[in-house]
Every structure is written in structure tokens, then in C-alpha cells.
Image (tube, rainbow, N blue to C red):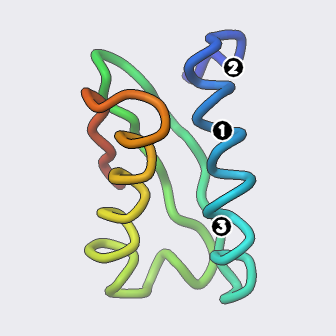
Amino acid sequence: KVNFDDPKIREIDALLDERIRPYLAGDGGWLEIVGFENNILKIRYEGACGSCPSSLTGTLMAIENLIKREIDPEIEVVAV
């Protein structure tokens, strides 16, 4: 379960809202944060993103690079 009272989670969620989710929504997809522990952020793709091959490679790497650059270089992002 995700603790949205955690300032780091709120910061990550706001960054996703601003920089990632609008593009995913434009393609009929979405993503949710489903976990964050030991600097591992677990996300779940929804809608069209769930079956898109690029969601597991290019998009995931772009999300991780953005979060590492903007928030914390130690965070890893995994799709579940």
C-alpha cells in the first residue's frame, strides 16, 4: 500500500501528473503508483499502456530517468 502522506511519494506523484500522465492519457493509457519501499517505486500501467511493448522499455526508462534527475538518483522504477 502506498503512503501518499510521504513527502517523496507526493513529489513523485506530482511529477508524474505534470510530465508523464498527460502523454499516457493521450494514447489511452495511465499509470498508478502501487508501492514504494527501499527506493524502489512500483508502478502499474493501465489502459492501452498495459499491452504496449514500449511501456516496458522506453517509457519505463524515461520515467525512471526523470525521477532520478528531478527527485532522487537512488530510486529504481519497476512495472508490476
On screen, 56 above or below 12? below
On screen, 27 above or below 36? below
| Residue type, label 1 | Asp
Q: Earlier in the sequence, mark 1 or mark 2?
A: 2
Q: Which of the two marks, 1 or 2, is nearer to us in this view?
A: 1
Check disc 3 and report its element: helix, strand or loop.
Answer: strand
3D distance between C-alphas at marks 1 and 3 = 13 Å
| Residue type, label 2 | Phe
Residue 79 appears at what percent x and percent y?
A: 35, 55
Identify residue for label 2.
Answer: 4
Question: Which residue occupies the foreground of this view, 67 or 32?
Answer: 67
Residue 28 appears at what percent x and percent y?
A: 70, 85
Question: Which residue occupies the foreground of this view, 16 or 52?
Answer: 16
3D distance between C-alphas at marks 1 and 2 = 9 Å
Q: Specify whether 65 is left or right of 1.
A: left
Q: Residue at point 43% right, 57% down?
A: 63
| Residue type, label 3 | Trp
The disc placed on residue 13 is: 1
Which quadrant of the figure contains the N terminus? top right
Q: Is residue 80 visible?
A: no
Identify residue for label 3.
Answer: 30
On screen, 19 above or below 54? above
Query: Which class describes the residues within 10 Å of circle 2: few (<14), some (14-19), or many (20+)?
Result: few
Disc 1 vs disc 2: Cβ atoms closer than 8 Å? Answer: yes
Query: Which class describes the residues within 10 Å of circle 3: few (<14), some (14-19), or many (20+)?
Result: some
Residue 72 appears at what percent x and percent y?
A: 38, 27
Check disc 1 and report its element: helix, strand or loop.
Answer: helix
3D distance between C-alphas at marks 2 and 3 = 18 Å
- The residue furthest front is 69
Q: Which of the two marks, 1 or 3, is nearer to us in this view?
A: 1
Identify the image quadrant of residue 40. top left
